[in-house]
Amino acid sequence: MIPYGKQDINQEDIDAVVDVLTSDFLTQGPRVPEFEAALANYCNVKHCVAANSATSALHLACLALGLKQGDWLWTSPVTFVASANCARYCGAEVDFVDIDADTYNISVVELEKKLINAEKAGHLPSVLVAVHLTGQPCQMEDIYALSRRFGFKVIEDASHAIGGRYKGKPVGNCQYSDITVFSFHPVKIITTAEGGAAVTKSEQLHKKMLLLRSHGITRDDALMTHESDGPWYYQQIDPGFNYRMTELQAALGVSQLKRIDRFVKRRHELADRYNKLLSSLPIILPWQHPDSYSGLHLYVIRLRLDEISKSHKKVFNELRAAGIGVNLHYIPVHTQPYYKSLGFEYNDFPASIEYYRTAISLPMFHAMTDEQQDRVVQVLRDIVS
Ligand SMILES: *Cc1c(COP(=O)(O)O)cnc(C)c1O
């Protein structure tokens, strides 16, 4: 089976992890701050908090922004469930904004309409999670302008987008957001096995996320309610969590980050090849906004079902049966039983459902060979022609 995504591990990565195993610290040592500094530098942003997953980082981001019971978080239905679940962890409500038919990212037109209605009804969102689906940045400048006009905070879920650029600047620089979150799950662009990070320009948000990452415990005298009892002393001032990344993961991250530009460049070569080789098939190729240089976590095609004699499911099954590890990103979150139980209806977000009816993620990863890609193209051509 040619997988849809796969990590790329070399000898340097292995040596970096083994070095940590024989060092003094397996956790809470020097590697995590080193990884955080390297990531912040790469993204051209001031602060970084590494975490044990992007899911944890999204939770920390929501808490740091003060999201709480009675508040609303909005996001796109076409994302991984974690982009919405982070609100529920804080006791907040979730609503969705339908996608743009070309980029599959949150539609700025729909967002503005919904904000105008929400303002009239008196329940504007506190936080918007803008998901850079497939690695293509959302229209952040427009989203930022709306956030100023309607008074909400912005988290970029850039789990797909590290290494990408928006208007020439690195995703994660937080020019148009409060916090940006990355995932380092093995299928993503760089990996730490499990892992994630939140980056921000704000010193205050940085401090808050650091505190909550480690039990809400501080050793900073300035934050304590009274003078320290002695050198052993710490205070717990918030109900925090253990969301820490290990030293092993951070060392792998530092090593992987050195190759990120190569990874993204290869993904672009593969995408360009797919674009050429698939251009005559009855499918819609991924459209790229001129403002974006995608991280290209995913290559998503959409079937023109009126020109194909098979159903979406049949095409998908035949690809899998032929050893092509296709996938579908994502089942619209509002259709999940948990979100249905909160009151969402299947057809609430028609563009997202239309996307779901036709989308297929083709295999794409750094180590994919041209021969493997040719095989994917040939099998797909035979199935849809
Ligand atoms: C992978 C992913 C996450 C969750 O990442 P983890 O590191 O596995 O917690 C969140 N949002 C999006 C869009 C993702 O693709």
Image (cartoon, rainbow, N blue to C red):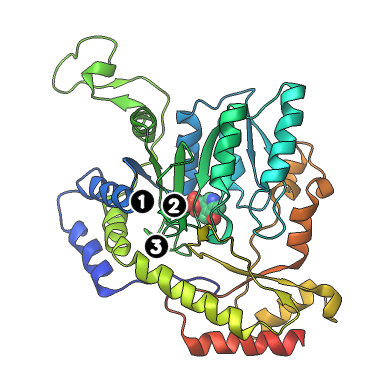
- Tell me the quarter of the picture where residue 91 sits: top right
Q: Which residue is mark 2?
A: 171
Q: Position of residue 123 (x, y in %)?
A: 70, 24
Give the amino acid at mark 2. Val
Decide which of 96, 235 is in the foreground and name it: 96
Disc 1: CA contacts within 10 A as few (<14), some (14-19) or many (>=20): many
Q: Which residue is mark 1?
A: 43
Give the amino acid at mark 3. Ile
- Tell me the quarter of the picture where residue 306 sits: bottom right
Q: Secondary structure at mark 2?
A: loop
Q: Is residue 63 above or below residue 225?
A: below
Disc on the earlier residue, 3 or 2: 2
The N terminus sits in image quarter: bottom right
Q: Nearer the viewer, mark 3 or mark 1?
A: 1
Q: Is mark 1 within 8 Å of ligand 1?
A: no
Q: Secondary structure at mark 1?
A: helix
Decide which of 112, 332 is in the foreground and name it: 112
Q: Is residue 139 above or below residue 191?
A: above
Asked whether disc 2 touches disc 1, contact meaning CB atoms under 8 Å apart, the reply is yes
| Cα distance in 3D space between marks 3 and 1 | 14 Å
Report the label total: 3
The C terminus sits in image quarter: bottom right
Relative to residue 337, is residue 164 drawn left or right?
Answer: left
